[in-house]
Amino acid sequence: MDRLGDVLDPFRKQVIDIKDALAHARFRYDGIDLILGNLSDAKARGAAQEIFGLATEKMDAVDSMLDDIYRKLSALDRTFETRDHRGGPDS
């Protein structure tokens, strides 16, 4: 049977790939934020800042969730790896 780490590795890679895509989206987002920050209309500029502020909160929340998923996958792998080395019930 495959080692649990071999099963979990593709999921961890997907989390890393998603975090990378999020970082690229954040880079583009920052560029748009800079452009809209120079609007001459104060109301439009204020609305853009509010929207971008909320979007930042959501991106940060997604990033934190991805970190948590990655940590849980790694902890699960370590737990079962330790169990296998100790000669756990499934050894």
Image (cartoon, rainbow, N blue to C red):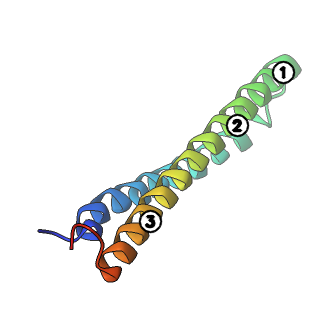
Q: Residue at x 26, y 67 (%)?
A: 89
Image quarter where the N terminus lies is: bottom left
Picture layout, residue 78 above or below residue 49 = below
Mark 1 and mark 3 lie on one chain; the one further toward the N terminus is: 1
Depth order, front residue of 44/83 = 83
As drawn, the residue found furthest toward the bottom would be 85
Image quarter where the C terminus lies is: bottom left
Depth order, front residue of 23/91 = 91
Q: Relative to 37, is 90 on the left or the right?
A: left
Mark 3 and mark 2 lie on one chain; the one further toward the N terminus is: 2
Distance CA(mark 1)–CA(mark 3): 49 Å
Q: Relative to 34, is 12 on the left or the right?
A: left
Name the mark nearer the viewer: 3 or 2.
3
Distance CA(mark 3)–CA(mark 2): 26 Å
Q: Relative to 33, is 83 on the left or the right?
A: left
Distance CA(mark 2)–CA(mark 1): 24 Å
Q: Residue at x 84, y 21 (%)?
A: 41
Assign a secondary structure to mark 1. Answer: loop
Picture layout, residue 32 above or below residue 27 = above
- The three-letter code of the residue at mark 1 reads Asp
Residue 70 at x, y percent in the picture: 47, 58
As drawn, the residue found furthest toward the right would be 42
Depth order, front residue of 70/61 = 70
> Mark 1 = which residue?
41
Assign a secondary structure to mark 3. Answer: helix
> Mark 3 = which residue?
74
- The three-letter code of the residue at mark 3 reads Ser
> Mark 2 = which residue?
57
Q: Residue at x 84, y 24 (%)?
A: 46
Name the mark nearer the viewer: 2 or 1.
2
Picture layout, residue 72 above or below residue 4 = above
